[in-house]
Image (spheres, rainbow, N blue to C red):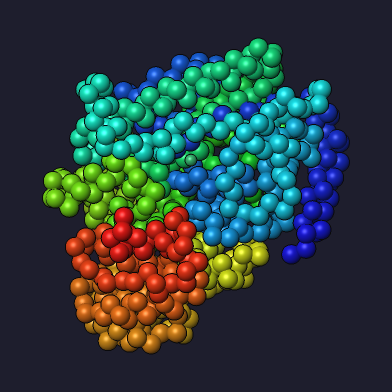
């Protein structure tokens, strides 16, 4: 892709837009300033604005009194880089190749996907970001006027409107990484009786203290945000500035960040619109709304506030701006979610929430949510939860995090806000289930969702233009999705299709055929000869490892030296990491089993740095951490 065309396109595009705009008298008016106050890793479950017993946050409460509270605001992804890539491009990440946290290599955006600040700069805004970006795509030139810990709207020209993002990391997951000694001292001085543990967590002092500490972090963030707003007031900017407060995705006790439960996706979201710009808000000051909004909507919403027409082909729609009707917006009741790789931990989960029902599709249901992951397990609560599971000290709801999932889950969020009562197998919910299955399936196919190819294949073939790659491979992706969907039916109804998939000439159909076999477990043993032969002879490493996965998960015979040779043949770090995920899953499920793996099968440069994902996985697999 030529750099010049990439640079030129937005300019031409905007010349067109601006000419268009100047022909409309209302666009000659002054534009509102827009500020986003973004708290890290923050679901609605820890704030009293949303949840009884949550942290009191007076500055946010004040903003809410003078603004609008969105009860159903969702990140589309439960983790930073994917959520932030979604926000700034206004695009579903699995469609544009930004769905892996964190990028192994950044993708190139096609010409018609333009980051939000680029639009705003062209409209005359001064654009500043303080400071986290974490985008999974190539920035072909600076997209912000300033983006750093020093970035401030104060450097704008006289009279220039500004768009400023202020990120707050006080609530970030990393701030809950304390050690046992710190925990003991904290337990001596903290009263934890007022904490309401979530039903899926073990009720232990560790969990209670972690939750209480997170409440403290929320209160601290509120003070920081209050200070920022006070500055705006002192500078006389409140009357001309629209302020958003929101969480960058959910979190951040275990089973939130990284997962498609509401705790990973349902974020606090408050918007303050000053009197002068109140015609841009279909919602009255001081009210709450039930309309569903999600992160793909943020870009079109800001464009709408800035007074320009929304370009065609956007994934989201505006929820603020003139000519929008509250009654229409409140009919919006749908949001899609996606979870893929998180550091070294692989999964493929998609979700749709429609009204009170939430449908989660686990394409690889044999994965357990609690599979070991270096960064996540730095939190004592994670370690303790896993240990209690191994010791058999958890009830059914608390154990689910470490057990295989069903291919589909269905929750009634109104009755079951913590998603612990899976309705997917109940006859009386069959119609709802089938309806949501179809909605999600159509969405995944229409994207098309690039995650049905394994990440290393995508990196090799799709990076230059992921959207174009998706369009060219739409039919193949549909075939992959249909193969993956075989695990939704009774085994006997699909055994012949599974056989055909295992014999297919396309390696990724065989790959998904094996994943489907692993979903059925020992019921699929009639294919054992074929699976063994794939493990021995398939030309694709990633297909071989899925065969090994079936053998391992079903306690069938497998030779450790053959696994070592397979690892040794890994063509890239990403391929090695994806293969190692199968082994990490097996070890998480069977902590005492010795796999006899050897780190030295990998090139030195994949394992020499402590934080390399392959190194992290191998440390775990060889009991070095
Ligand atoms: Ca975050």
The answer to whether one can see residue 581 in this image is yes
Residue at 59% across / 15% down in the picture?
A: 230
Q: Quadrant of residue 494?
A: bottom left
- Residue at far left of view: 392
159 shown above or below 557: above
Q: Is residue 223 left or right of residue 196?
A: right
Q: Nearer the viewer, residue 556 or 284?
A: 556
Q: Which of these two is toward me, 385 or 297?
A: 385
* Left or right of residue 78, residue 122 in this image: right
- Residue 36 versus residue 474 in the image, above or below: above
Q: Is any part of residue 64 visible from this angle? A: no
Q: Is residue 160 left or right of residue 479?
A: right
Q: Residue 459 in the image: x percent, y percent?
A: 56, 67
Q: Position of residue 586 (x, y in %)?
A: 27, 65
Identify which residue is drawn at 50% across, 66% down: 605
Q: Which residue is located at x 63 percent, y 16 percent? A: 231
Image quadrant containing the C terminus:
bottom left
Query: Horizontally, is 26 left or right of 373 in the view?
Result: right
- Quick one: 109 or 227, which is closer to the camera? 227
Q: Residue at x 74, y 64 (%)?
A: 1
Q: Which residue is nearer to you in this view: 91 or 555? A: 555
- Image: 168 above or below 337: above
Total numbered labels placed on residues in the image: 0
Q: Is residue 523 above or below residue 153?
A: below
Residue 534 position, x and y percent, is 36, 84
Residue 242: image x %, image y %?
64, 24
């Amino acid at each position: 892709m030529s750099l010049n065309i990439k640079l030129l396109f937005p300019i031409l595009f905007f010349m067109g837009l601006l000419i268009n705009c100047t022909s409309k008298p209302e666009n000659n008016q002054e534009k509102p300033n827009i500020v986003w106050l973004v708290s890290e890793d923050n679901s609605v479950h820890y704030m009293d604005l949303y949840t009884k017993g949550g942290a009191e946050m007076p500055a946010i409460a004040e903003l809410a009194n003078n603004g609008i509270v969105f009860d159903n605001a969702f990140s589309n992804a439960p983790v930073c880089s994917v959520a932030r890539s979604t926000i700034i491009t206004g695009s579903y990440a699995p469609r544009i190749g930004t769905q892996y946290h964190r990028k192994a290599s950044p993708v190139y955006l096609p010409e018609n996907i333009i980051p939000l600040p680029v639009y705003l700069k062209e409209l005359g805004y001064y654009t500043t970001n303080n400071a986290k970006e974490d985008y999974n795509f190539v920035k072909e030139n600076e997209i912000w006027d300033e983006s750093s810990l020093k970035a401030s709207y104060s450097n704008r020209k006289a009279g220039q409107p500004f768009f400023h993002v202020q990120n707050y990391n006080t609530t970030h997951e990393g701030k809950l990484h304390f050690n046992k000694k710190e925990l003991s001292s904290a337990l001596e001085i903290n009263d934890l009786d007022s904490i309401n543990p979530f039903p899926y967590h073990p009720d232990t002092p560790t969990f209670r203290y972690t939750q209480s500490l997170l409440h403290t972090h929320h209160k601290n963030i509120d003070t920081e945000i209050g200070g920022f707003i006070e500055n705006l007031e002192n500078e006389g900017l409140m009357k001309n500035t629209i302020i958003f407060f929101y969480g960058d995705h959910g979190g951040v006790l275990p089973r939130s960040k990284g997962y498609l439960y509401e705790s990973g996706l349902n974020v606090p979201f408050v918007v303050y619109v000053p009197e002068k710009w109140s015609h841009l808000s279909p919602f009255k000051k001081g009210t709450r709304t039930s309309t569903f909004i999600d992160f793909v909507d943020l870009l079109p919403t800001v464009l709408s506030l800035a007074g320009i027409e929304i370009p065609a082909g956007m994934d989201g729609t505006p929820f603020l701006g003139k000519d929008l009707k509250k009654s229409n917006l409140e009919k919006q009741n749908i949001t899609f979610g996606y979870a893929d790789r998180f550091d070294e931990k692989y999964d493929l989960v998609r979700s749709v929430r429609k009204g009170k029902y939430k449908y989660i599709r686990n394409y690889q249901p044999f994965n357990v949510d609690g599979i070991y992951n270096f960064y996540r397990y730095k939190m004592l609560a994670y370690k303790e939860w896993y240990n209690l599971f191994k010791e058999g000290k958890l009830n059914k709801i608390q154990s689910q995090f470490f057990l295989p999932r069903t291919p589909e889950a269905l929750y009634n969020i109104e009755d079951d806000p913590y998603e612990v009562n899976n309705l997917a197998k109940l006859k009386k919910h069959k119609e709802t289930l089938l309806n949501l299955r179809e909605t999600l399936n159509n969405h995944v196919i229409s994207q098309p969702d690039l995650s049905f190819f394994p990440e290393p294949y995508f990196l090799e073939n799709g990076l230059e233009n992921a959207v174009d790659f998706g369009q060219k491979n739409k039919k193949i992706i549909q075939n992959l999705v249909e193969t993956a969907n075989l695990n939704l039916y009774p085994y006997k109804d699909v055994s012949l299709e599974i056989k055909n998939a295992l014999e297919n000439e396309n390696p990724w159909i065989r790959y998904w055929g094996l994943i489907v076999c692993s979903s059925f477990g020992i019921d699929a043993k009639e294919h054992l000869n074929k699976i063994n032969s794939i493990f021995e002879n398939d030309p694709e490493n990633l297909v071989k490892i899925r065969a090994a996965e079936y053998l391992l998960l079903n306690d069938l015979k497998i030779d450790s030296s053959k696994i070592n040779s397979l690892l040794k043949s890994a063509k890239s770090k990403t391929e090695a990491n994806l293969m190692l995920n199968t082994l990490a899953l097996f070890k998480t499920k069977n902590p005492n089993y010795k796999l006899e793996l050897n780190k030295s099968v990998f090139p030195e440069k994949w394992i020499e740095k402590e934080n390399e994902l392959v190194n992290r996985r191998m440390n775990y697999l060889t009991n070095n951490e």
